Amino acid sequence: MCAAAYLPIGDYALIGDCHGSALVSREGAIDWACLARFDEAAIFCRLLDAEKGGTFAIVPRDPSSVSRRYLPDTNVLETSLVTKTGVARLLDCFTMRQGGRTHPYRQLLRVVECIAGEVTFDVVIRPRFDYASLRPWLRHHADRGVYSAVGGDSAFVLQADVPLQISRRDSSFLGAMTIRHRQRRRFSILAQLPHDMRLIRLSTAGLDRRLKATIAWWRRWVRRGRYDPTYREQVVRSALVLKLLTCAPTGAIIAAPTTSLPELPGGERNWDYRFCWIRDSAHMLAALFAVGHPEEATSFKLFIERTAAGNGEDVQVVYGCYGERRLAEEELGHLQGYRGSRPVRAGNHAADQLQLDVYGELLNASHLWRRAGNEIGEDGWAFLRGLVDAACAHWNEPDHGFWEVRGKLLHFVESKAMCWVALERGIRAAEELTLPCDIDHWRAVRTEIRAAIERDGVDPERGCFVQSFGSREVDASLLLLPIVGFIGPNDPRMRATVDAIERDLSDGLLVRRYRNEAVDDGLPGGEGAFLMASFWLVDVLAMQGRLADAESRFQRLLGLANDVGLLAEEFDPSTRELLGNFPQGLTHMALINSAEQIQRVRAGLNHTSPVAERGNARPNRPVARKTLHHAPIKARPRSERKAAD
């Protein structure tokens, strides 16, 4: 299959219900869908194989002009279609309900309405279970307009307002319909268990009520937040993306809803992002705090404590969205890959990596959670204290770093700085709440980490921070140093770092992670510019007082989103295409934080960061500064910690 058979990544839009998700193309096709769980084997995956991947297409028979939007303040997608004979719209969503955290409908709903004249559509529903390795058994159940697809451990019940034929040759449901002014047709897919199929048929009025309730559900969620009016539309859309990436039953937040969308078409930097990275989730929680949605923080906090079994030493880099620790990475060799980008992967070896920044990310998330007015209980402090102790024990080890390199382990400066953040946030909590810990040891290690970074992590000639100890290369993750409060934005070393990043990694707007040609990350080939890092540069420029430059960059970055406001992980400036898994939570997190940072500078808070110091602004209600009443928790002596390690 030629590359032209694949639509640009930016031609898709995301729908979901905080359990599963799907991508809908501008052409009206669902080319990726995981109905019940983000990380399950897709039932439609034309996105990764245009020939045999499977799709659910509702397409006008006559050529049409297309425009799209999300209904305001919702995750309900509206695609407007104008043909020679009429005007129609297609509404796509996963239905939402009160109580859906534990009892979701797991329903994909597609509604077609004719606005004027008449429009004829062709319908093709071609399920391919287990990442297109299995053609399911398709059946029509009597004359009730109910159909089913079963195979392996997957199944769904399909309800349609129009008659469908089953193509045995192609293992597809096929149909056609002509709808006239004010007519509406509905298609519902309900995820099922193969061994417990329930042939549920809902009335047309019942389906319409579910659509209406879904619109209301999302708008209620948006109303709970707070948004500066300057960039409200973009910030609300980004917040809605982050909410869609939240696993409702557990509180985990996945990095993206897709796997193996390439960082460069034809290359092999193709990863499965449908899991919960500690770092990503902590950054995304900071963004949700910024726009007034702290409830997700409590769920994520409990998820991490449960998953790590209450032991900070046992925290992994990444987990499954239900707490799975083993995420074995396999290659799906039967799939072509998006535009021939192989391998296609399911699972991610990052679960086995050492990434020292996770300690600081979790302590910073706890800091924001506490500053929002929440207290730390005995168990919570024991967990956090274990994280700080782990940072003390391991900070001077080499690791895989923020970018999860698959080459040689290095002493990455950003990793060391985040261990410093773990110590700093832990010390602050202990001092403010009079909590038991070996605070003198913590203070000594905090000082030791800073001294090591300032000694070994600075280029003596250029005076800038470097990617790793002994290197002369800069790295976009160094932009986090002032954002997390490790160093002031106008410190001469940070100014020199920004200058070096603008010179070595930026094209004037977009920022690369690092120079691939100069850094051995264990992988061949190149990649696009990282949108998250490009937003970080906006933050730091704003913090340095360069507001006009920061806001100009920010507005141009907003212009890189697709027609419905979604952004991927990367962008290719030569082809003007979005690249990588889509939409990317960290990119939308960075957008929110940049909008927040610009507003803080306008308010005269240019030397503080929304990630590090948002909590230092007056919280909505006072934080209790009191000693927890429980038996003292004795910190392990350093010798015992080393012996245990």
Image (cartoon, helix red, strand yellow):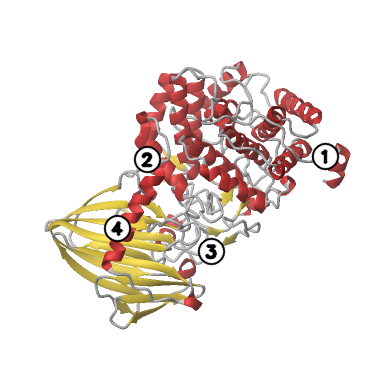
Q: SS for tag 3?
A: loop
Q: Where in the figure is residue 120, as x and y percent of width and height?
A: 18, 64
Which is in the foreground here, disc 3 or disc 1?
1
Which kind of residue does numbered mark 1 sit on? Lys
From the image, tell me which residue sits under label 2: 561
Q: Where in the figure is residue 305, as x and y percent of width and height?
A: 66, 49
Left or right of 355: which side holds 612? Answer: left
Mark 2 and mark 3 lie on one chain; the one further toward the N terminus is 3
Which kind of residue does numbered mark 3 sit on? Leu
Whether tag 4 and tag 2 are in contact, CB under 8 A, the answer is no
Which kind of residue does numbered mark 4 sit on? Gly
Q: Which mark is residue 634?
A: 1
Q: SS for tag 4?
A: loop
Residue at image position (72%, 49%) is 314
Cα separation between marks 1 and 4: 60 Å
Q: Is residue 137 above or below residue 399?
A: below
Which is in the foreground here, disc 2 or disc 3?
2
- Check disc 3: other Cα within 10 Å, few if <14, some if 14-19, many if 20+: some
Mark 1 and mark 2 lie on one chain; the one further toward the N terminus is 2
Q: Where in the figure is residue 483, as x and y percent of width and height?
A: 56, 28
- Whether residue 181 can be seen here: yes
Which kind of residue does numbered mark 2 sit on? Ala
Mark 3 and mark 4 lie on one chain; the one further toward the N terminus is 4
Whether tag 2 and tag 3 are in contact, CB under 8 A, the answer is no
| Figure quadrant of residue 577 | top left
Q: Which mark is residue 28?
A: 4
Q: Which mark is residue 332?
A: 3
